[in-house]
Amino acid sequence: MGGLSEILDVARQALMSQQVGLDVTGHNISNANTLGYSRQSVDLTAATPLKYSFGFLGTGVEVSGISRIRDQMLDRQIQSTNASLGEAGARNTTLSQIESALNESSGAGLDSMLGKFFSSFQDLSLHPEDAGSRQVLLQQAEELTQTFQTTSAALTTTSANLVDDVNQKLDQVNELTKSISDLDGQITNGLAQGTEPSDLEDQRDQKIEELSKLMNVTVSRDSRGSTMVSVGGTVIASGGGAVALSASVSGGTLHITSQASGADVTVASGDIGGEVKMYNSTIPGYRTQLDQLASALITRVNTLHTAGYGLGTPPPTGNNFFTGTDAATIAVDPGIIADVNKIAASGDGSAGDNSVALAIAGVQSENIMNGGTASLAEAYSSLVSSVGADVSAANTDVQSQQAIYTQLDTQRSSVSGVSLDEEMTNTIKFQQAYDAAAKLVTTVNDMFITLIGMKES
C-alpha cells in the first residue's frame, strides 16, 4: 500500500492545486472592472488512482486546465444587436441633421417661403403697376430660390460628410481586423502548445464586438480555435491575416470594397451599413422629391410668365421668371433682377390688367405634383412628414436596440462577469484547502519523525 512518501506527494499536489486556484481567483478579482474580461475557473480533477490488492487508492488532485466562462450564443446575439444598434444610430444622427436643414420649425423653411412668394404675386395683382410691389416680389423670389439652394446644399454636405465618416470608420475597421488577426495567431499558437490563452481570447472577442458595432459580421471558429470574421461573405480577418477595406463613390453610389480583390463588400448594417444606406438610398430619395418640387415650380411659373407682359412701351414679354432645372440651380432670371418691370402681371399688355399675376398666385393651389394629385405645398409637406417619420422611427429603433443590448449584456455579465462575493468565497475555500494540505504535510512530517525515533531506539 502507499507509504508516507506517497501521502506527502498527495499533499504537495494539493498545495500546488489550491495555489493555482488562489492565483485564478486573484486574477478574477483584479479584473472585476476590466472591460471585456471573462471570469476564469480552475478545473480540478482527481489524479489517476493506484491499484492495490485491497482496491484503488487515490493519488490526490491535478489541475486539468483553466476555463474561460463564456457563452458563444450570447456573443453572437450581442454582435447582431450591436450591428442593428449601430445602423439605427447612424440613421438617427443623419436624419436629424436633414430635419434641421429643412428648417421648418423656425418658420424660415420652404413651406413658408413658397407661401410668401405666391402671396407677393397676389399683392402684385392688386397693384399691377406698382414698382414697390414688384420689388417685394423680387425679394421674396430670391429668398425662395436661396432656400431651395440652401436645402439642396445641405443634402449635398450631409452626403459628403457621410463619405468622410465612412472612411474614418473604415480606418477603425482595418485596425480592428489587423488586431483580431494578430491575436488569433497568438491564440492558435498557444493552444497548439497546450496552453489556454484566455486573456488573449477575451481581447479578441472584445475587438470583434467593437467591429460588430461598425458593420454586420459573421464569426466562425475551427477545430484549432482559430476565428474567421467575415462581412457580406467576404473574410476580413483570420489567422491568415486581415483584408483592408476602403470606400469610393462611383456613379453617385458609395461602395465598400476589398483592397485585396477590388470587389464590392456588402455592408448591410452597423454604423457603416446605416451610413451607406443613407447615402445611396435615403438622401437621393429626399433630393428627388426636392428637385421635383423645384422643377415643377420653375416649369409652371415660367409657362405662365413668358405668356404675360410687364411694364414698358412696348410692354416686355416672353421672359422667364426662373432659371435652372432643380433645387440646386433654381434662381431668379437675371433679366428680372436687372429690371423688375419685366415681371409679367398682365395677360395682354394693357394697363391695369392683372390676369397673369392672379394665375401665378393661383399656382399655389394647383395640383401639379405627384401626377396631378397634390399641390406644391402638399408635396413639400409630404417630404417634411416623411423625414419626420423617418427620424421618429430611427429614434425608436435606437431605444429598442439599446434596450435589447442592455438586456443581453446583463445576461452575459451574469455568466461571464466577476462576482466579488463569489470570488471571496472561493478565496476562503482555496485558503482552507491549502491550510488543510499544509496540515497534512506537517502530519506526515511528524510521522516521519516518529518512525525515525522508533528506529533509533
Image (cartoon, rainbow, N blue to C red):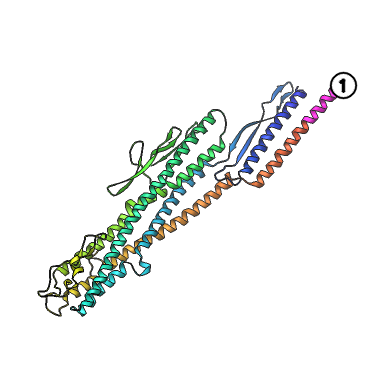
Q: Position of residue 414 (x, y in %)?
A: 58, 47
Please state which of residues 203 and 8 is positioned toward the viewer in this rendering: 203
Above or below for 324 versus 34? below
Crowd rating for badge 1 (residues with CA inside 10 Å; few <14, some 14–19, many 20+): few
Please state which of residues 162 and 208 is positioned toward the viewer in this rendering: 162
**Quadrant showing the N terminus:** top right
Quadrant of the image occupied by residue 349 = bottom left
Segment tinted magenta in the rendering: 441-453
Q: Position of residue 340 (x, y in %)?
A: 19, 72
Q: Position of residue 410 (x, y in %)?
A: 55, 50
Side of 393 relative to 336 (left or right)? right
Above or below for 311 versus 210? below
Is residue 370 visible to the viewer in this orientation of the structure? no
At 31% from the left and 64% from the top, the residue drawn is 382
Quadrant of the image occupied by residue 230 = top left
Please state which of residues 313 and 243 is positioned toward the viewer in this rendering: 313
Q: Identify the residue position indicated by label 1 in the image.
A: 454
Above or below for 147 versus 313? above
